[in-house]
Image (cartoon, rainbow, N blue to C red):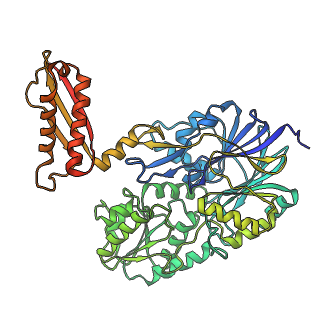
Amino acid sequence: MADQNNELVFLPLGGLGEIGMNAALYGFGPRGDQRFVMVDCGLSFAGEEAPGVDLVLPDIGWIEQRRKQLAAIFITHAHEDHIGALIDLWPRLKVPVYMTRFAANLLEARRLGEPGAPKIDIRVVEPRRRTEAGPFSIEYIPVAHSIPESHALAIRSPAGLVVHTGDWKIDMTPTAGDITDEADFRKLGDEGVIAAISDSTNVMREGVSPSEQAVAEGLAEVIKASPYRVAVTTFASNVARLRAVAIAAEECGREVVLVGRAMERVAIVARELGYLDGIKPFRSADAYDRLQRDKVVVLLTGSQGEPRAALARIARDDHPAIALAPGDRVVFSSRQIPGNEKAIGAIMNQLATAGIGIVTDADGLVHVSGHPRRGEMRMMYDWLRPACVIPAHGEAVHIAEHARFARSCGVPHVVVAKDGAMVRLAPGTPEVVDHVKVGRLYKDGDIVVAEDDRALPERRKLAASGIVTVAIAIDARGEIQGDPAVDVMGLPLLTKAGEEIIDIVADAIGRTLDGLPRGKRRDSDFVETAVARAVRSAVNGQWGKKPACHVLVVEV
């Protein structure tokens, strides 16, 4: 029996309240002096709230300040929302990172493609073997998912067994990767599970997910029925989908052309590890023009509407090697991640305008999620019989519905938590006992910036209201030398009355300078503030918006 002074806690830094950016801590020991392990270190994608930013990372500042208390990081699988932040954040922690061979090889391939990326201390683990880290013993339990070598984690401590499900589904014919074996989880249930931290993504959907084998058959039907080119876009990491398309293409006498660096990287690693055994080598994009129109299938990235991905460039007709023509088809073998609907819709509209057919999962079984529906979740809870469930991997609506569902399955305790909530799992009744500061970091170009970095609100301001720049030369006597230099960006050209905005700005500057006493003109800070205030007010009077205004006073 564990010492009552010791507590087992769960602390999510990301992934509870959003889909993506998964990172969680498990700690054991006296309150305030626990030893921790981290599970996953993922990213998500920025939206309109962060102009110019592509990637969002969890703020790990809390554990960074307690780095000596962190024993290791354990990665459940190789999806970017579980592993993608490691390259940027690992140097702040510098602890061993445990993952399977597929994840390790994929991360290494990515690292080699990023100049200056750190050499991470990776330890390859085997399924169903235990790894000791601080007060914890971690066992990798294979599960089916949409990427090979996905695992739940059995996390043992002196306070008991916790199951962190990771991303999973029940699929007895996955085509690439493992099944979710009932025997594994019933064995854990027999041992006694004090808490399950469990996937909420598909809790709104009843029933059981179709198998990857059924999707392979659906894709084969689409390819066979297509008279001309077929392009299939899917998540680059979905090796089972790559296999399915390749097999269907070969049955139809077609060659597969692979397009997109991320997909090429995954294919190389998958072939090295045997997941593409029996599949003919893929052709590169430069072979595309040499293949007959009815003898090609293109596998490409861009299923989420990413503007620089292959599909978006093809839809804009500016890809250097791949073009589609009326009568060709594009198959979206993927789901729309929340927030990407507008970008995906724009690409679909471009394709439709060009006369290119579009096939989605509304037209047939061309995609299935890698996450469990309610029927599968019910089975998992029957196997594990957890004393407590904490819904994870979902937005607020998913978390709330998962909590209701878990209670309906007879789970004794359900804790609804969000990022930053420290949950005591043992001893006693599970409950939130503290809150810590969490947030987001933004990958801005090659730099990781904090959530409160001034660049982001400034960009939002510039995007909404533009900027006026003014340069004024003033001599030591306070006399204006020449006309001020003025430039405007992001503002309308004309007012409602047809007057040029730049003339409105110039008049405001002139009136302000003429109204300043000569002594005040010698105070450059005073001049800059007065001119900026006048410009913003004048533009607001004509436009209804206040632009950013940058004034530079040069003393001559």
Q: Residue at x 31, y 49 (%)?
A: 463
Image quadrant assignment for residue 201: bottom right
Viewer can see residue 179: no
Image quadrant assignment for residue 322: bottom left
Q: Position of residue 249 (x, y in %)?
A: 48, 75
Q: Residue at x 44, y 84 (%)?
A: 225
Quadrant showing the C terminus: top left
Q: Position of residue 130 (x, y in %)?
A: 78, 47
Query: Against 6, is 156 above or below?
Result: below
In the image, taking residue 495 as reference, residue 38 lies left or right, namely right
Quadrant showing the N terminus: top right
Q: Nearer the viewer, residue 409 or 103?
A: 409
In the image, taking residue 258 as reference, residue 553 lies left or right, namely left
Q: Position of residue 115 (x, y in %)?
A: 44, 38
How many marks are shown on the rendered structure?
0
Q: Residue at x 54, y 48 (%)?
A: 84
Viewer can see residue 353: yes
Q: Nearer the viewer, residue 535 or 410?
A: 535
Q: Residue at x 64, y 69 (%)?
A: 174
Which residue, as the protein is rendered here, is positioned at the far right? 1
In the image, taking residue 36 as reference, residue 240 lies left or right, namely left
Query: Against 53, is 69 above or below?
Result: above
Q: Nearer the viewer, residue 524 or 224?
A: 524
Query: Against 39, is 452 above or below?
Result: above
Which residue, as the protein is rendered here, is positioned at the far top? 476
Image quadrant assignment for residue 513: top left
Q: Position of residue 42 (x, y in %)?
A: 57, 49
